Amino acid sequence: MAIVTPLRTAAEQQLVEQFANVKAELPGAPSVRRLREAAFAGFEAKGLPNRRLEAWRYTDLRGLLREAKPLARPAADNAAARARLAELNLPGVRLVLVDGNFAPALSTLAELPAGIVIQPLTEALVSARSDLPRILTGPVVAEGDAGLMLNTALMRDGVFIEIADGVDLAEPIAIVSLSSGEAEAAFFHRSVVLVGAHAKATIVEISESLGAKAAQINGALIFETGDGSEVQHLRLVTRQAEQSVQVLSLLATVGAQAKFDSFALACDAATLRQQHFVRYAGEHSEIGLRGVNLIDRTEHTDVTLVMDHAVPHGTSRELFKTIIGGEGTGVFQGKVIVRQYAQKTDGGMKSNTLLLNDGATMFNKPELEIFADDVVCGHGATVAQMDADQLFYLMARGLPRQQAEALVLQAFAGEAVEFVQDETLRELVMAEIERWLQGRRDTVSVGEAG
Amino acid sequence: MLEIRNLVVKIADEDKQILNGLNLTVNDGEVAAIMGPNGSGKSTLSYVIAGKEDYEVLDGEILLNGENVLEMEADQRAAAGIFLAFQYPLEIPGVATMTFLKAAMNAQRKARGEAELLTPDFIKRVNAAADRLGIAKDMLRRPLNVGFSGGEKKRMEILQMALLAPSMCILDETDSGLDIDALRIVSEGVNALRDKSRGFLVITHYQRLLDHIVPDTVHVMSRGRIVKTGGKELALELEKNGYAAYAEAA
């Protein structure tokens, strides 16, 4: 059989060269190196994710990336990063990556709570632990994703966090990924969070840019959570450089009788693909994936999730609220798989969108693959304009148009934000949403009540 | 004082003309009732005064204390003193009633160049007004009008009216959907706000509401115009004889 070599784009060709140049210096034990090689071979065969792949239909990375930016080099201490971190004033432990490289000087590692071990990924990747390939591979439904394969091949740094059994973290652990934005660059980072049985933790993941130069960011965050654990994951993707392109993969394998809740806010996110791959590894667990996407100008935010009910008695809830203005594009693809033996699965998925004007576009694609016969699974997607009557009511009480619009939009987004349990973090999310709303200039076109 | 002169209005995207040269004056301290059959343009009149955008004013003017409000957006009219109690108050999911009340009061104060209310002062005012209208505290914490009964929504409208202290109150079929007790509470709330500096325009189908809110003048509206004006006894006559005679007059 003839081997078909697809024609490569300039960016693909550059990635091939980059991998050849850096693979020897990228960290990794032999098992990790094999993972990298296999992943890159997969990428070479498939090329950059493109519209011919169903999962990437609306986010054509091959078309979007004219070139592969040079790989970022480890950055020195960064004054802008210090200033921004001080402003963020996050509670708890702070782990900072600058251009994908772990920056211990910017991180707060001195007083870790008991039961927590944190390593830079560069160290973890060369460690002798035998479970590394399994952990790094993540849920089976993530296998073969071209975006993730590139990350596996080129991941350089990140953090590796282990939370021991029974530890109840009072304060969150934040992984803050800052793009310095001083020069155009690409970086590939990955972090791992292993949560022990019956442990409770809140993990915050932030992605921001400090400068205006475009970045190509490919990040992955992998969770493995133990039986009876309770994990909250909060992601904020904000303040990106206008021309940045970012792929963030969330991989979670959730133990039995556990809770896993993720909330992601994307605003001023340039071009962003968020992909969640989640698998139930044990029965009677509750998983929630929620988020708010605020999209303006020519921005593009894609949320694609695969929820794998591999065992019986799993409960899953997804709720994504999207507001699109300008000529922005939103994408929601939600795939819920209920395997043949996953009886008594209870799934509910919702995507609600408000389009603020005629230039805005939303693609919704729910996919339910149900192979069990005793399940409850529902999904709903709505796309609407702002309600003119609601707006008039608020204005008739004295609220200026912009304030009335902001109140309605804030309330719309708020329905998902209320699932963020930590009050400080919830306020952080609402403050970002308010900032975005106040920054909007365009007027909203409204629709009649349905 | 509200003066409406020769108001001609059509629906914005249609050729349908609703108000056909309407003239009406409501003096400070006056309670004026407008009665009329379905489709005579009563609700349109209330919306046009408040500044709803679905209509096009073809002719005429609406003056509040001598100032033409047709040039103003709805929020500016509210700050100038116009208040419309809606026939069907809108539900605003996700916006706590208290948050909304504070935003509305402060937006109007800001528009008038007054200082914003401090929270303790605000809460004191709301609680006092809510007590008078029999509005439970937990209702104030719930999202605005969401899951409220018809009566609760109308009471919430009167609460807003009390807090915003407008100079011209328009009540659009405030009696619709109210049982006898709710009608009494709402009417008492309105009566408590009667004041020599405040005008009321009470729109209703039925004379019943006017037993509770006794008007100074009664106007009959038909086919987009005021066709007869009289005292409160006119409402009783209408209740007895119906609107048929006035449909002819229009």
Image (tube, rainbow, N blue to C red):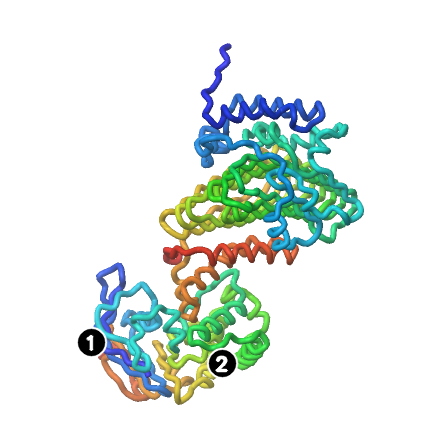
Where, quadrant-wise, is the N terminus of chain B in this rendering? bottom left
Q: Is residue A288 visible?
A: no
Q: Amino acid at mark 2?
A: Ile
Which chain's residue wears label 2?
B
Q: Residue at x 74, y 46 (%)?
A: A109
In depth, the one of A54 and A313 nearer the eye is A54
What residue occupies the far left of the structure in this picture?
A: B249
Expressed as whole percent of the image width and height from the top left, the position of residue A235 reads 60, 47
Question: Residue A19: which numbered mark, if any?
Answer: none
Q: CA distance from mark 1 to mark 2?
A: 36 Å
Query: Relative to B28, is A227 on the left or the right?
Result: right
Q: Residue at x 39, y 87 (%)?
A: B197
Question: Residue B250: which numbered mark, if any?
Answer: 1
Where, quadrant-wise, is the C terminus of chain B in this rendering? bottom left
In depth, the one of B160 and B31 nearer the eye is B160
Which quadrant of the figure has residue B76?
A: bottom left
Residue A329 in the image: above or below residue B12? above
Question: Residue B185: which numbered mark, if any?
Answer: 2
What residue occupies the far right of the structure in this picture?
A: A114
In depth, the one of A317 and B54 nearer the eye is B54
Q: Amino acid at mark 1?
A: Ala
Which quadrant of the figure has residue A307?
A: top right
**Circle 1 crowding by C-alpha within 10 Å: few under 14, some 14–19, many from 20:** some
Going from N to C along the chain, the mark reached first, 1 or 2, is 2
Residue B170 in the image: above or below residue A223? below
